[in-house]
Image: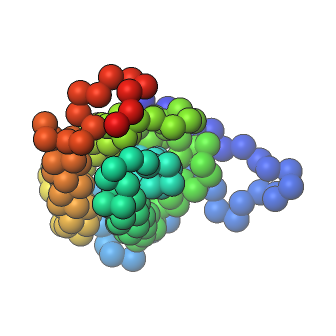
Amino acid sequence: MPTTKTQTTDTAHGEPWRPQQMIEDNPIGLDEEVVEQLIPKLDEIQCTFWTLYHQYQKHHWLVEGPQFNDLHLFLEENYEEVHKYLDRVAERITALGGIPTSAPDAQAELSHVEHEPEGTYRVRQMLQHDLDAERTLAEILREVISEAQDLGDPGTERTLKKALTKVEDRAHHLDHFLGEDSLEHGRPNGETA
C-alpha cells in the first residue's frame, strides 16, 4: 500500500534546510547501508501508527451504546499509547540520521493501513477496524524486527519489540471486546435495545 513520495517545494515556506531524503551520519555508529535500509521501513511504521492513532481517537469520540464508558476509556488509552510508540519510532529514525514523515497526506500514502472513511460505524465495526489495523501493524513490526536483527541493529530491534508487545496486547483486548458474549452481538442493523 505505501507509495513513493515526492519532495515538493512549498512556496510559502521555501526550501528546507535539509531535504527529507538526506540521511545524516548517525551518532550511534551504524553503517550507512544499514540505516538506508531501515529508515524507510521505520518511516512506514510511524506513518501506520499515525493512521491508527487518528482512528482510535475518532472511535473514542464517536463510540456509543451500553459499553460506552469502558470503550471510551479503552480507546483513549489506546490512542495515547499509540502516540507514545509512534514518537519512539520517529525518534529512532532521527537517531539513525533520517527525517520522519510529518505531513498528514504523506503519512497517509506511506501507511500500511488506510484511513477509515468519515462517518460513524457501529461499535463492533469500529473495533473490528481497530483489530485489523493492529494485526497489520504487528505483521510489519515482526518483519522489520527480523530485518533489524539481521542487519545488526539491536537498538531498533528493541524499540520495535517493545512496540510489538503493546500492539499485540491491544489486539488481544480488542478481540475480547469482540467476543461472542457481547451486548451488541448479533443485533441486526438498525435494531435497538
Q: Residue 167: x and y, percent?
A: 24, 54
The residue drawn where x is 43% and y is 49% is 63
Residue 82 appears in the picture as rendered: no
Q: Residue at x 71, y 60 (%)?
A: 16
In front: 7, or 45?
Answer: 45
**Would residue 152 be found to the left or right of residue 102 on screen?**
left
Residue 97 vertical position relative to residue 150 in the rendered view, above or below:
below
Q: Position of residue 68 (x, y in %)?
A: 37, 55
Q: Look at 39% across and 47% down and name the residue there.
A: 65
Query: Foreground residue, 158 or 31?
Result: 158
Relative vertical location of residue 162 with respect to residue 55 in this rendering, above or below = below
At horizontal 77% and vertical 57% (from top left) the residue drawn is 15
Residue located farthest toward the front when viewing the structure as drawn: 193
Give the x, y percent position of residue 143: 20, 44
Residue situated in front as seen by the camera: 36 or 121:
121
The N terminus sits in image quarter: top left
Residue 120: percent from the left, percent from the top? 51, 37
Q: Is residue 184 left or right of 57 when viewed as pictured? A: left
Farthest right residue? 12
Q: Residue furthest top?
A: 188
Whether residue 72 appears in this view of the structure is yes
Specify the quadrant that holds the C terminus: top left
Compared with 110, 93 (above or below) is: below
